[in-house]
Image (cartoon, rainbow, N blue to C red):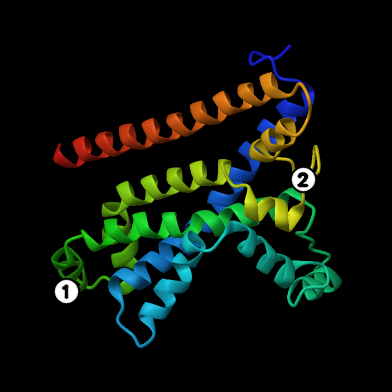
Amino acid sequence: MNPFGLTPLEMEALKLSLRVSVWAVAASLPFGILAAWVLARLKFPGKSVLDGLIHLPLVLPPVVVGYLLLVLLGNRGLLGAWLHETFGITFIFTWKGAALASAVMAFPLLVRAVRLSMENVDRGLEAAARTLGAGPLRVFFTVTLPLAVPGVTAGAILAFARSLGEFGATITFVSNIPGQTQTLPLALYTLTQVPGGERAAMRLSLIAVALGMAALVVSEILARLYAARMKG
């Protein structure tokens, strides 16, 4: 018996949710940092359009995002067919597809947190590094990124928490397959449709709340530790 009193199927859904969320953050973090830097530091025509596209998942119904992923990355999709035939890569009906859907939905939160942090970095420090002979990449990795660590940390944890709660895009793109794509929210939805599933649904709800609160608390603790370190 596991410590939460979960059935094997519910425990599998919890493990899958954690796996999907970790991979969603890991895969999207480099792109999120790059997108945040572009929006925070560069000026170019169409910047507002790019900003809008990055934040579009925040305002679109998740089901729409899932359907667009299905059209694009399904085995007969515009890009998915080529990936499947050329490299044997399949996203639909797999946990990888669930991680991709979660990453897309969480990406705007990640970018926004990192961008705000980068915008608060003193550009005079970057200019000073350049006058000392540092190139753009070295300035980024030795000045900009270290000073933006609080935003990166907050963005990653917010993206993780958002991925844990992703439902609409996931069920539309990869369906609700126990043991394969059935994450915590999907398992909770399934239990609400089954007679007598109320107690199990409540257990999963409490676990989801606990995980979300833990993510927020960890984010706050890390931010305070980093601020104290910077002051020291």
The CA distance from mark 1 to mark 2 is 56 Å
- The image position of residue 56, as x and y in percent, is 48, 67
Q: Which residue is mark 1?
A: 131
Of labels 1 and 2, the one closer to you: 2
Q: Residue at x 71, y 72 (%)?
A: 72
- The image position of residue 203, as x and y in percent, is 62, 21
Q: Is residue 218 visible?
A: yes
Comparing 180 with 29, the one in front is: 180
Q: Which residue is mark 2?
A: 176
Comparing 158 with 138, the one in front is: 158
Q: Residue at x 51, y 46 (%)?
A: 162
> Where 164 sits versus 124, above or below?
above
> Where 215 sits versus 152, above or below?
above
Comparing 161 with 190, the one in front is: 190
Q: Residue at x 76, y 70 (%)?
A: 80
Q: Quadrant of the N terminus?
A: top right
Tag 1–tag 2 contact (CB < 8 Å): no
* Quarter of the view holding residue 46: bottom left
Q: Is residue 135 visible?
A: no
Q: Secondary structure at mark 2?
A: loop
> Where 126 sits versus 63, above or below?
below
Q: Is residue 162 left or right of residue 69?
A: left
Q: Earlier in the sequence, mark 1 or mark 2?
A: 1
Q: Secondary structure at mark 1?
A: helix
Q: Residue furthest bottom?
A: 45
| Circle on res. 25 | none
Crowdedness near tag 2: few (<14), some (14–19) or many (≥20) residues, C-alpha within 10 Å: many
Q: Is residue 51 left or right of residue 204?
A: left
Q: Quadrant of the C terminus?
A: top left
- The image position of residue 94, as x and y in percent, is 77, 51
Crowdedness near tag 1: few (<14), some (14–19) or many (≥20) residues, C-alpha within 10 Å: few
Q: Amino acid at mark 2?
A: Asn
